[in-house]
Image: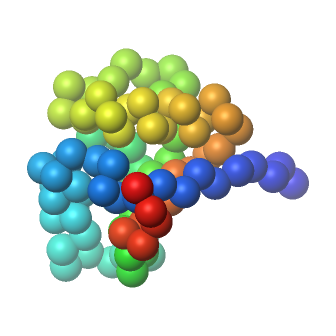
């Protein structure tokens, strides 16, 4: 078994257009299964979503992904986290 970290951050830290695009992914989908946001696995939860940090290890930032989201995922990965919990209730 491997134990990893989970970073928590407010959804308010993301650009509004990007947050809206991610939210649209979940419209009518089965929230129990990961979806793909330009190569980034994301899973919905009642107050936002969870994103996996795997893309920042070996890949270049997709042009559609904001610098802010990429930096958050990169910082979390460097801190030992596999996932980032974006939560509407988390303070900014």
Q: Does residue 54 appear to the left or right of 71 in the view shown?
A: right
Q: In this orientation, which residue lies closer to the viewer: 3 or 10?
A: 10
Residue 44 visible in the snapshot: no
Residue 76 visible in the snapshot: yes
Q: Residue at x 42, y 30 (%)?
A: 71
Count numbered badges in the picture. Answer: 0
Q: Residue at x 25, y 69 (%)?
A: 26
Where 56 sits versus 73, above or below?
A: above
Outermost residue toward the front in this view: 92
Q: How is the image coloured?
A: rainbow
Quadrant that contains the C terminus: bottom left
Q: Residue at x 64, y 54 (%)?
A: 6
Residue 72, percent across and down?
Answer: 45, 38
Q: Residue at x 37, y 19 (%)?
A: 60
Residue 42, percent across and down?
Answer: 40, 56
Locate residue 1: give its quadrant: bottom right
Q: In this orientation, which residue lies closer to the viewer: 30 or 92?
A: 92
Q: Does residue 44 appear to the left or right of 54 in the view shown?
A: left
Residue 41, percent across and down?
Answer: 42, 50
Outermost residue toward the right in this view: 1
Where 2 sits versus 50, above or below?
A: above
């Amino acid at each position: 078994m491997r134990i990893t970290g989970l970073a928590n951050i407010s959804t308010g830290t993301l650009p509004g257009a990007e947050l809206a695009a991610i939210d649209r992914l979940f419209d009518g989908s089965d929230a129990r299964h990961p979806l793909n946001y330009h190569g980034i696995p994301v899973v919905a939860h009642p107050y936002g979503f969870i994103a996996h940090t795997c893309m920042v290890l070996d890949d270049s930032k997709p042009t559609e992904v904001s610098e802010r989201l990429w930096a958050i995922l990169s910082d979390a990965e460097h801190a030992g986290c596999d996932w980032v919990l974006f939560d509407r209730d988390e303070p900014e």
